[in-house]
Image (cartoon, rainbow, N blue to C red):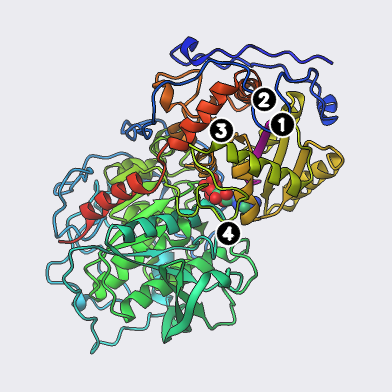
Amino acid sequence: MSKKTRSPKSPDQAPSPRPAETPAVKPEGEAAATAGQPAASPAGRAGSEPPRSTPKTVTGAPGSKPVAPPPAARSVGKVAAGRSAAVAAPPATGAALPASDAADQPAPSAPGAHPVMLAAPVDAGAAHPIAASAPGADEPVTPVEPVAAMPAEAPSLPLADAPPSAEPPTVEPAVAAATAAQPSEPEPEPEWAPPPPPARDSLFIVHISPELAPVAKVGGLGDVVFGLCREMELRGNHVEIILPKYDCMRYDHIWGLQCTFDDLWVPWYGGAIHCSVYFGFVHGRKCFFIEPHSADNFFNRGVVYGFNDDIWRFAFFSRAAMEFLWKSGKHPDVIHCHDWQTALVPVLLYEVYQRMGMTHPRACFTIHNFKHQGVTGADVLSATGLNRPDYYFHYDRLRDNHNPQAINLMKGGIVYSNFVTTVSPRYAAEAKDQGQGFGLEPTLHIHHAKYGGVVNGVDYEVWNPEVDPLISANYSVATLERKYDNKRALRARLLIADNEKPIVAFVGRLDPQKGIELIRHALFYTLAQGGQFILLGSSPDSSINAYFWGLKHQFNDNPDVHLEIGYNEELAHLIYAGADITVVPSRFEPCGLIQLIAMRYGTIPVVREIGGLADTVIDKDFSHRPLHERNGYVFRDYDEAGLESALGRAIACYYQYPEHFRELMKNAMRCDYSWNHPGQDYLNIYDLIRER
Ligand code: ADP
């Protein structure tokens, strides 16, 4: 068995611009790789560290600058043809606006529309983000919201380009009948009004989120909400978070949990559901947890997601969170909501609560993944008290762009928010112009002036090898040697061999998005190249889990492989600290935290050039960027040759140019992917949209 390797180019020989993918190493047969033996002994010294045989260094410059992401593309591009959002059964009252009425086409701004750019001032009256509807369109059909309670200066100035149609939607007879049949919404007590907002210099920000790390974390969304909230508090703002009270939360991470509001009645299907609201601190963050007392048992399911009524569960949560804000008299400057689960919040804010008198808050909506949009029948509208199906079931508002029988919650969030962000500039452009918007491309084009990408930060209080209590030995750039204590501890914990090989790791959800085939190929290829492979991940899809369980059994006796199928936060910390290389071969990746966390721990990312991965990882060999800014390996094509071209270079560098590898590790550790920069970006957005 022989191992063919291409000599890696040293960085100063790197061609530019970046060439097409060149597979660095032809893989051995996978059966051979399974045996776990590289063809030739790597030229490294024994022990866990990369050998130090080569005196050349990668970089000469001390310190590395944070990577400046490119601006989001603004050009009008091709609209994606396909999509994969799940669509529920059409509503019985299938409204029938003709497809030709599809209004989500790029259109010129309506007169008076205020195309908001980040630097532009916002008119204080710019309270309604889709105020381009024709006069009268805001009139409720059913006596839900007391129109008399609307502010004298009725919100009129849109923050974004106007939706193209100023015509009120035509009401089909079936819809009109359905409208008349809607149960009426309980009216707010007329004698009660919330106290006025206190004068303050700092901002009052409320996040309404389905996830928060570490108490209710499924993926990166939970990390992002925690880290962003912490950063905003550090900057002197008042931040509160509203969450569902799941039975499966990590209650050991909540301090002082107590019921603080026991009489919240949340309108639901013409009646109301009694809720209790609990308050507690999650590592210093102020959190309210909403517990409904209903036979639906919305949040006592053992896991956060995965049920047929997920859309109803989170629609209820959205309504409950808004009702809690209203009843508790809170007047946040900004309500920040996340993903389809809370996309109804801006709709409810502007269509229900603003009419009742909650005129101060503005809405920011962050999309963490366009793939899941909350596409469903229109029933959920009347459930939440949005009782004008003809009005909402219109292409200007919530009607799905592709399925005329369905509404799209994420679309509603985009249309009604004052600002929409996604989690990296590259992904923002891919979603709008390159087919990653899963059908929302036209909507993003219409609302492009209030749309942009902000790269997620990493909470360096939680993810910091200098102080991390969950790893064996703390270390920094100056004490990099100690990283190898973690490598040894990781091997001891997972019962894999202690040798000179590099550890290549994958941590993450085993979702098709993450590149299942290439993760698998990375395992075989790593073994063929003389490395060890560790995987930590799980999937809600039992067939995917079963597949990886099969792989685990296949490699059970291999001393260079460990697959951990499951979710284990503590082990994740040790893997980031102990591995040498991490692979993130995603099909698409909105931002990706794995590569950012890995870099903080000096673990070199090998990533596909897509979304946030492309914004944050700079190829060691093929880049225009200064040497000290390069921090990993990048490949373009989603295929095995693409992966090999980057992973092969990483492993070859580890063995053949260990000093280069070590400098690359230091470059990665010096990158600043804290919340510092994105925190400022979000503050700018909040400042732009808030009422003054
Ligand atoms: P996504 O949000 O798409 O799942 P991200 O890269 O944005 O992916 O964030 C993933 C986060 O979840 C990281 O903090 C990662 O460490 C963590 N994570 C994912 N899977 C696991 C797992 N099986 N065990 C522990 N942590 C995990």
Among numbered discs 3 and 2, the one appearing first in the sequence: 3
Tell me if I can see residue 132 in this picture: no
The image's mark for residue 604 is: 3
The image's mark for residue 640 is: 2
Q: Is mark 1 on a helix, strand or loop?
A: loop
User: Which quadrant of the figure has residue 442?
Assistant: top left
Foreground residue, 253 or 356? 253
Badges 1 and 4: C-beta atoms under 8 Å apart? no
The image's mark for residue 47 is: 1
* Residue at disc 4, CB closer than 8 Å to ligand 1: no
Q: At label 3, which amino acid type do we have? A: Ile
Q: Which residue is drawn at 40% across and 38% down?
A: 432
Q: Is residue 467 above or below residue 479?
A: below
- Label 1, label 4: how many angstroms apart (C-alpha)? 59 Å
Q: Quadrant of the N terminus?
A: top right
Please report the bounds of the magenta region as a residue range: 502-510
Q: Position of residue 502 (x, y in %)?
A: 68, 31
Q: At label 2, which amino acid type do we have? A: Glu
3 or 1: mark nearer the eye:
1
Q: Residue at x 38, y 69 (%)?
A: 386
3 or 2: mark nearer the eye:
3
Q: At label 4, which amino acid type do we have? A: Ala
Q: At label 1, which amino acid type do we have? A: Gly
The image's mark for residue 89 is: 4
Q: Residue at x 66, y 55 (%)?
A: 567
Assess disc 2: are there few (<14), some (14-19) or many (≥20) residues with their C-alpha within 10 Å of its C-alpha: some
Among numbered discs 3 and 4, the one appearing first in the sequence: 4
Q: Position of residue 556 (x, y in %)?
A: 85, 43
The image's mark for residue 227 is: none
Q: In this view, does 117 lie above or below 585?
A: below
- Label 3, label 1: how many angstroms apart (C-alpha)? 19 Å
Among numbered discs 3 and 1, the one appearing first in the sequence: 1
